[in-house]
Image (cartoon, rainbow, N blue to C red):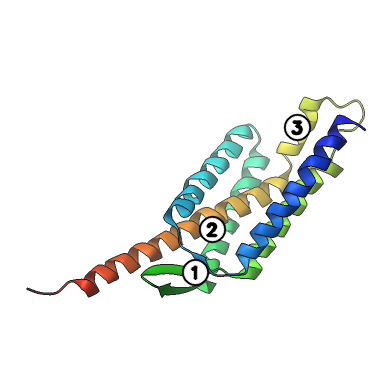
Amino acid sequence: MAQQQIIYLILIPFVIWRLYSRMQKLIRRQEAKPVRLWFSLILFPLLILLMAWLVHDDPAAIGSLAGGAVCGIALATLGLKLTKFDVEGGKLFYHPNKYIGMGLMILFVTRMIYRFTLAQPSPGMSQNQASYAALHSPLTLIVMGLVFCYYAPYSAGILLRRAKLGKEGDAGNSHPQ
């Protein structure tokens, strides 16, 4: 058995478990935990900047990444409008729109599976050439821009809602003396 096949046999069950776990979160109520939201708010813009830096020499690639980013921000705005919020015990909970979350996840995972399995280097192509082609793929960059620029503004929106709840809670608990 080849080394690459062994790696796939080890990684595939882990990836399937993580996908199942993530899908479960997409369809149920979640607590608005600041640490997780801030992590998304910081990580995803850094990933977009990294991708932009890696393809900065290719205007078409930058355009694809930017186009996906704009669509991701618009989708995050829609997602926040469709998200249902509730408060229980002074904590904010939210119900994300399951269709948007699942759709983005399926799109991202499908594209990554395609890139890593079906789009292998052709004979005579060096690994560097294959990596360059994979990284500069317009469709891959659109999907990455869409996904990464969905989760950052979405997390920011939930954090803002949480902060607003805190201010309203403070105002409601203050008593004139």
Which image quadrant: the C terminus? bottom left
Q: Residues within 10 Å of mark 2 (few under 14, many from 20)?
A: many
Which image quadrant: the N terminus? top right
Q: Which residue is mark 1?
A: 94
135 left or right of 152? right
Q: CA distance from mark 3 to mark 1?
A: 39 Å
| Residue found at x 52% / y 65% | 30
51 relative to 23, above or below = above
| Residue found at x 64% / y 38% | 59
Circle 3/circle 2 CB separation < 8 Å: no
Comes first in the chain, label 3 or label 1: 1
Circle 2/circle 1 CB separation < 8 Å: no
87 left or right of 147? left
Q: Element type at marker 2?
A: helix
Residue 67 seen anywhere in this rendered image of the structure: no
Please tell me whether mark 2 or mark 1 is closer to you in this view.
1
Q: Which residue is mark 2?
A: 73
Q: CA distance from mark 3 to mark 2?
A: 28 Å
Residue 119, horizontal then vertical, whole percent: 84, 41
Residue 6, horizontal then vertical, whole percent: 85, 36
Q: Amino acid at mark 3?
A: Ser
Q: Amino acid at mark 2?
A: Ile
**What number is the disc on residue 131?**
3
Circle 3/circle 1 CB separation < 8 Å: no
Residue 24, horizontal then vertical, whole percent: 65, 64
